[in-house]
Image: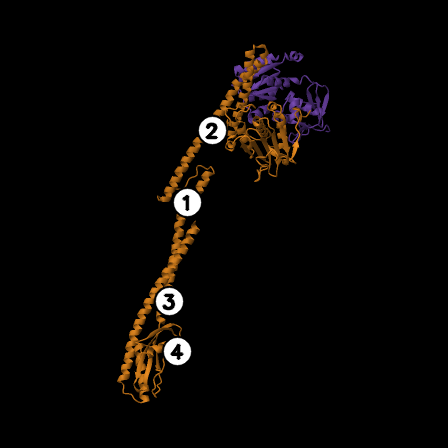
Chain colours: A orange, B purple
């Protein structure tokens, strides 16, 4: 901004001063020359008249006398006009006199142009002309007048004036003006520079402070100096920062308090829940001895306690994540193993839903640095969500890897949800259809926790949905601390026909004991 | 139900300040043939332990008076009696702290009665499967029947759990045990559980049996897999 302002000022200043200078110079030159020419004309008129008078008053007849007369006249003219004035005396071409006079030139005759001579011969009153003097090269003025030299006939008298003085004066004025203009432009540029600097410095300081505030250093403030607009800006800015800091601190305090509360409540609930849990189990185990309605009550109590417990565990987990107290233990683990294990584990639970799982793995390893329990939990959540919404359609699962990350896509072809709902899927306690019951025992926190877990890994969990066409979830985890690459490992949505292109179909074992070391 | 009869004599000390929880645990334990003894204050736990000499201790971590962690440490200093923590917090720090102060196992609240009984049984079970004989591991000699571990004739005191870990490894020299397998064999977990249990107890075992715990020769770590017994050459 400063450079732009200075350059603009320089260009505009130079232009303005140049124009003004040119105008002033033209005015001065015209004035100077006009005055001089007026004087020249007056002087030459007077002198040519004086020369003619001298000629007429003379009694010279012989060529010698006439010659003497010419010399005298020219001498007199020289005395009158000074040394700087040149004189040219030429014989009129129409002069037929026998007497040839030596004209004693004090200026080269070629200063007088043929046009000038013609003007004199045609009898114009005092013709004059600007010329460039052939000797010195400076501009000059030539004034012509006819001169009758008694019996020697018609001659032409020319005065050659040099304008060297005027030119010198002009050059002097020009250089003075130029220097002045230069100084002026320089001064203007310098002033612009200073002014912008003064205006820009507080703005820059404000920008610096603002960026520090944005980084979270809330106690950063602008220095306030003096009592001008800049000080007002700084003061207002500081007031804003102050209020911002107050608000944020207050919110932080509130949310800390709230998180503590949630965590405390969860913990406090556990002690009575332990008793209730055990009591319910004892009742449940003895239900066969009870009358039917009591037995059924014991069953309901037991089932709902399971649900209550899961909810409490999820609540505690999310409050732990909110409090930033979640600690990850990283191991190098193959995502494919985790996915296969979770799929095989969920098959018995999803039997009533009639869902077929199809697992597609790309070639090579899918090893990444991850906290296994958390990643298992994410995958478990995606799978049970898919089962719940698949409406008996198959569920496709793809696992792939590239240099920077590993990914799993879980796709169902069931009810789906609208694109607007895709982002809300991760909201706490959110349901696409409030009327729909949770058949897989979800708490409504699973997806939120899953996304938090993915974020804790510096990974990404995203959702796609289309009404009636199903939903797709993609989990991407970085392989190392370098983080994910620019290119996604797998597309967010794969159609049913695209899954085979990911890789080999992996056979699944429905035997729950498979994989365990004997 | 012959096993139940044999366990009739097993006496369980329940240290918990919440009367409802303690009573309920008592009901569950009695139903499975154990004899519960109660303690509701941290300061009295050690006295009751001395007076009653229980077979297993169920220990709540948050107690009035002396904390569960301190009680655990003090009992462990004089006895290898199995200690199972009852913890309302499943936070990493608390669990690890409890295990490091000497607890053998933990059950996070709320738990199911079956879960609790399974944990208690697992700690008593080692009496069941005694395969007699002398097993060697590194320069150690293990008298399985007499529950004695000696190095150059000098006895090394181990808790029953540490003894179990050592014997399990020593019985299959060269075999690598994953943490999951050890959890199943030693702790009696049917499904994968907290592998930190294994890590913490292997550290404690090493501190007792290794000449240089920083450079273990008896219990070797196989990176990314688990543990195995060191060679018998010395």
Q: Are marks 4 and 3 on the same chain?
A: yes
For the C terminus of chain A, the image quarter is: top right
Label number found at residue A489: none
The answer to the question of whether label 4 and label 3 lie on touching residues, with beta carbons closer than 8 A, is: no
Label number found at residue A256: 2
Residue matched to label 1: A203
Question: Which structural element holds mark 4?
Answer: helix
Picture quarter containing residue B132?
top right
Label number found at residue A110: 4
Marked residue nearer the N-terminal end (1 or 4)? 4
Marked residue nearer the N-terminal end (1 or 2)? 1
Marked residue nearer the N-terminal end (4 or 3)? 4
Kindly identify the residue that appears in the image at 43 percent across and 50 percent down. A2
Dot 3, crowdedness within 10 Å: few (<14), some or many (≥20)? few
Residue matched to label 3: A171
Q: Where A448 sits versus B64, above or below?
A: below
């Amino acid at each position: 901004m400063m450079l732009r302002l200075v350059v603009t000022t320089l260009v505009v200043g130079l232009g303005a001063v140049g124009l003004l200078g040119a105008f002033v110079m033209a005015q001065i030159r015209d004035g100077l020359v006009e005055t001089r020419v007026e004087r020249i004309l007056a002087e030459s008129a007077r002198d040519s008249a004086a020369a003619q008078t001298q000629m007429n008053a003379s009694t010279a007849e012989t060529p010698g006398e006439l010659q003497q007369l010419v010399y005298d006249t020219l001498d007199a003219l020289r005395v009158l006009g000074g040394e700087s004035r040149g004189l040219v005396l030429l014989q009129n071409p129409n002069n037929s006199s026998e007497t040839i006079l030596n004209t004693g030139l004090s200026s080269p005759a070629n200063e007088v142009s043929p046009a000038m001579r013609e003007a004199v011969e045609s009898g114009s009153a005092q013709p004059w002309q600007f010329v460039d003097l052939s000797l010195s090269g400076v501009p000059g003025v030539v004034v012509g007048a006819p001169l009758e030299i008694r019996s020697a006939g018609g001659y032409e008298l020319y005065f050659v004036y040099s304008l060297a003085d005027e030119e010198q004066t002009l050059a002097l004025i020009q250089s003075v003006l130029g220097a002045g203009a230069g100084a002026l432009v320089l001064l203007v540029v310098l002033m612009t520079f200073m002014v912008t600097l003064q205006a820009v410095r507080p703005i820059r300081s404000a920008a610096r402070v603002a960026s520090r505030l944005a980084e979270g250093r809330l106690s950063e403030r602008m220095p306030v100096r003096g009592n001008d607009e800049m000080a007002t800006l700084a003061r207002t800015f500081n007031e804003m920062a102050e209020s911002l800091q107050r608000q944020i601190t207050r919110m932080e305090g509130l949310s800390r308090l709230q998180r503590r509360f949630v965590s405390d409540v969860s913990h406090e609930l556990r002690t009575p829940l332990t008793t209730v849990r055990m009591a319910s189990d004892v009742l449940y185990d003895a239900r066969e001895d009870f009358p039917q309605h009591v037995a059924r009550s014991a069953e309901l109590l037991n089932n709902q306690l399971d649900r209550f417990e899961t909810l409490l565990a999820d609540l505690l987990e999310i409050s732990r994540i909110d409090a930033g107290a979640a600690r990850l233990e990283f191991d190098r683990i193959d995502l494919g193993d985790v996915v296969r294990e979770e799929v095989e584990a969920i098959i018995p639970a999803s039997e009533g839903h009639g869902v077929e799982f199809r697992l597609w793995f790309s070639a090579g390893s899918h090893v990444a640095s991850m906290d296994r329990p958390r990643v298992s939990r994410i995958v478990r959540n995606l799978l049970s969500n898919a089962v719940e919404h698949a409406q008996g359609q198959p569920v496709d699962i793809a696992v792939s890897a590239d240099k920077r990350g590993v990914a799993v896509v879980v796709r169902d072809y069931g009810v789906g949800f609208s694109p607007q709902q895709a982002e809300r899927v991760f909201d706490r306690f959110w349901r696409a259809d409030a009327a729909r019951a949770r058949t897989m025992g979800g708490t409504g926190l699973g997806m939120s926790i899953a996304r938090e877990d993915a974020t804790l890994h510096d990974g990404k969990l995203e959702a796609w949905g289309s009404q009636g066409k199903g939903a797709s979830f993609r989990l991407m985890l970085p392989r190392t601390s370098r983080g994910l690459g620019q290119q996604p490992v797998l597309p967010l949505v794969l159609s049913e026909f695209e899954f085979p292109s990911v890789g080999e179909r992996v056979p699944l074992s429905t035997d729950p004991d498979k994989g365990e070391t004997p | 139900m012959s096993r139940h009869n044999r366990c009739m004599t097993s006496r369980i000390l329940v240290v918990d300040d919440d009367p409802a929880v303690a009573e309920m645990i008592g009901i569950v334990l009695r139903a499975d043939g154990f004899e519960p003894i109660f303690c509701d204050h941290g300061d009295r736990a050690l006295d009751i332990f001395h007076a009653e000499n229980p077979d297993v201790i169920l220990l709540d971590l948050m107690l009035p008076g002396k904390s569960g962690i301190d009680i655990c440490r003090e009992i462990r200093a004089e006895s290898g009696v199995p200690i199972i923590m009852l913890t309302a917090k499943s936070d990493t720090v608390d669990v690890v702290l409890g295990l490091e102060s000497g607890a053998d196992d933990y059950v996070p609240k709320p738990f199911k009665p079956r879960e609790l009984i399974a944990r208690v049984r697992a700690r008593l079970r080692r009496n069941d499967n005694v395969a007699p004989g002398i097993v060697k591991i590194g320069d150690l000699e293990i008298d399985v029947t007499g529950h004695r571990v000696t190095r150059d004739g000098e006895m090394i005191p181990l808790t029953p759990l540490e003894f179990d870990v050592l014997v399990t490894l020593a019985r299959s020299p060269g075999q690598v045990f994953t943490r999951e397998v050890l959890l199943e064999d030693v702790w009696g977990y049917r499904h994968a559980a907290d592998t930190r249990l294994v890590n913490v107890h292997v550290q404690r075992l090493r501190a007792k049996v290794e000449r240089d715990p920083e450079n273990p020769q008896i219990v070797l770590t196989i990176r990314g897999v688990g543990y195995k017994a060191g060679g018998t050459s010395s």
